[in-house]
Image: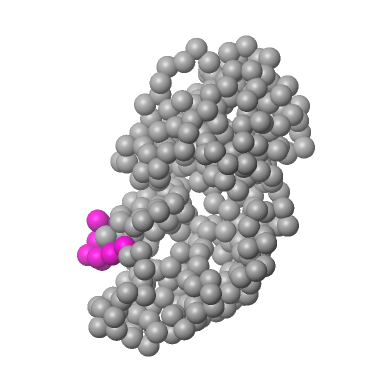
Amino acid sequence: MANLNGLSYHRLIVPYSKVSDLTNFKCDVLEDLDVLTDEMIKGYQYVVYQREIDVYGKSIEKIKRFQKLGCKVIFDIDDYWHLPTSHALCKVYKEYQIVKQTEDILKHVDIVTCTTQILAEKIKPFNKNVKVYPNCLDLTDEQWQSKKEPSVFTRFGYIAGVHHVQDIKILQIPIRKARAINNAQFVLGGYTDNDHYKYYESVMKQGNYLRINAINVYEYGKAYNLTDVSLIPLEKNIFTEGKSEIKLLEAAAHGNAAIVSNVKPYNIFPKDTAIFLENSDINGWYKAIKRLTESSQMRQDYAEKLKEYTNINYNLNKWTEKRKQDLALELV
């Protein structure tokens, strides 16, 4: 699959590869489903699309073609499709009428899959056949096996994709205050030379600082080996509450403690799994950084609770079994 991104990796490659490995379902990954002939389509029971089908208005036509040939259409979506005006893609969404297109797709597909119950409730007015499969990490994958590189610092990492300018703004003043804390280091992961990451760096580059350049989706988790605490700020709005809990899962896999915005979907986690703070609590964010710098025991306690919770509730094999059962039942 060319130009594989994190979204495709977590929502298509990992879960469906696992289904294929652990069951008699065979999964093929194709860059362009339009190359499939009618005879080829008849050999499949399902086709899975992620987030979009055809931005140029031919989505329903393509859905009906598969259905006419006896192939059920699964549409996976991991974000709410109404963007806040501050989002970088807001203009593009308006230009291509993505809100209307998404809702039309939801109405016509056979099955919708999503990451959380919160997002499922937003989907149900358009399609009742919604199945929640949370993001899960394949902990047998090398990038999720913690191999911490030693450091004299307690390292606070922010590892994120490109569309999080409003989120990282939450850290601006707390990190500026925390730059004088002895033995604290701030780490920015995923850096790419563009305006978004330059802004991220203006927030994170305080006191002791480390930049980690972007890594491909099969290896980006290794960046966590240069961190001890995950910083997970998230703006509070109707769009962000539809996001998944992936950053806490990544932190857990690498034995990190976490400081997290006290917003959905993260605050569904037990309160002893991370430090949850209001976005406006500047002093609270600063104090959390200071306390975790000073106490290795506190870091360990939070990390252990987080790992324990995620290992039980976000177990890939468990959710693969659920997906397998659901897929089989849909064919009955």
Q: Position of residue 33 (x, y in %)?
A: 36, 72
Q: Residue furthest bottom?
A: 68
* Magenta region includes residue 26: yes
Q: Quadrant of the N terminus?
A: bottom left
| Quarter of the view holding residue 295 | top right
Q: Residue at x 65, y 37 (%)?
A: 199
- Which sits in the foreground, 101 or 268? 101
For the point 59% across and 38% down, the residue is 197
Expressed as whole percent of the image width and height from the top left, the position of residue 312 reads: 42, 44
Check the picture and name the quadrant holding the C terminus.
Answer: bottom left
Vertical comparison of 58 with 49: above or below: below
Q: Quadrant of residue 298?
A: top right
Nearer the observer, 96 or 297:
96
Q: Say whether residue 320 is visible.
A: no
Residue 98 percent location from the top left of the image? 61, 69
- The quarter holding residue 145 reads top left
**In this figure, which colouring scheme has been used for the structure?**
one colour
Residue 63 in sight from this viewpoint: yes
Q: Residue at x 34, y 80 (%)?
A: 71
Name the spot of residue 89 as percent of width and height, x first: 63, 57
Position above or below: 30 against 154: below
Confirm whether the magenta stretch covers residue 191. Answer: no
**90 left or right of 66 in image:** right
Q: How many marks?
A: 0
What predominant SS class does the magenta segment belong to?
Answer: loop
- Seen as rendered, the residue at the extreme left is 24
The residue nearer to you, when weighing 275 against 99, is: 99
For image coordinates 62% across by 45% down, the residue present is 164
Residues in magenta, as a range: 21-29
